[in-house]
Image (cartoon, rainbow, N blue to C red):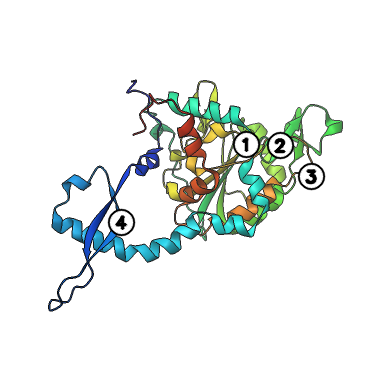
Amino acid sequence: MNSKIRPLNLEDLVKGENHEENVYVPMTSRIRDKPRFDTVKIVIPMLTRRSFSYKHLTIGITHALKNTIKDKEESNIASGLPLLQKTPNLAYFTQIYIQRPKEIQTLSKLVKDLPMQIDYLSKTLFLPRIKGYENKKTLVLDLDETLTHSVKNSSQSHVRVKITEDSMVNINIRPYAQDLLKVASQDFEIVIFTASQYKYANAILDHLDPMKKYIHYRLYRENCYEFQGHFIKDLRILGNRDMKDIIIVDNSLVSFALQVDNGIPITTWTMDLKDTQLRLVMEYLRVIKTARDVRQVNRNVFGLSKLVKDSLSENVILT
Ligand SMILES: [Mg+2]
């Protein structure tokens, strides 16, 4: 067993290690009534149940019962099921990564190989909150093959963008890319996080958002964490944002290897003008904007962290 192998920020996976048992619960609190006991099933965290005294256990059960109805209502939203039921197109959207088993393997290997300690503090940014966006979630968008694709031949491209005085780039713009920026910026703080160089990326982003109205922040290759030839987008560098409120849309699954449950996988795009993935992303964002924890919704809808967990070998310690 290799104790050094331990994926980061997959701590939610261990929460499945709960123990379910029957306990007796008093069904009345009135002193004069003879206590009536009933049997209910509750879930007690495996790691802590031994430390419960009877008194604490009773308090725990009372809280658990009180929270049952509330949790049922909220878990329905968190499961993403209403979303899938309302928008049948999303069934296709959520299946896209299953058609890419090789990428799941690459992602899993990377998760397994990632070092336990990563120095993200030296890269951490404290991006000021923009007025009106103080309480909004953060939508992190990749650029290449998610929103645009650059091509060598200008005759095959949609637009030609000037990078410097003597260099140009030909790009194709994915259908709904600008609509996504416009619509999503009403409900989300938008951060473009690209593994590309800033001059190239800036030129394209200036074209997509010429008035600088929709994209609030731009992060580049130097903001990525480079590991085994991959540019990983460690969302922890968004120092003053809460991980439960950050979503990343990226065609490369390894980009969000450090925070799998924050990721929305999307197909790699180059030129298909009939592509509707970004329209589906917009539909998904409409629901997830109200989630208490975006990771829970993503986990239930995409199940990526489970796929990663399943494909990891038994020798890996998921703690
Ligand atoms: Mg990309």
User: Residue 62 lies in what quarter of the image?
Assistant: bottom left
Q: Which mark is residue 274?
A: 3
Q: Residues within 10 Å of mark 4 (few under 14, many from 20)?
A: few
Quarter that holds the C terminus: top left
Q: Which residue is mark 4?
A: 41
Residue at point 22%, 47% (across, down): 49
Q: Which residue is mark 1?
A: 251
Q: Give coordinates of residue 141: x percent, y percent.
A: 59, 43
Closer-to-camera residue (262/155): 262
Tag 1, which secondary structure?
loop
The residue type indicated by label 3 comes to: Lys
Earlier sequence position, callout 1 versus callout 2: 1
In this rendering, the label closer to the viewer, 4 or 2? 4
The alpha-carbon separation of the residues under discs 3 and 4 comes to 50 Å
Q: Determine whether the beta carbon of the residue marked 4 sits less than 8 angstroms from the nearest atom of ligand 1.
A: no
Earlier sequence position, callout 4 versus callout 2: 4
The residue type indicated by label 4 comes to: Lys
Tag 2, which secondary structure?
loop
Earlier sequence position, callout 1 versus callout 4: 4
Q: Give coordinates of residue 242: x percent, y percent.
A: 42, 49
Question: Is residue 211 something one can see in this rendering?
Answer: no
Earlier sequence position, callout 3 versus callout 4: 4
Q: Is residue 73 above or below residue 171?
A: below
Question: Is residue 71 something one can see in this rendering?
Answer: yes
The alpha-carbon separation of the residues under discs 2 and 3 comes to 11 Å
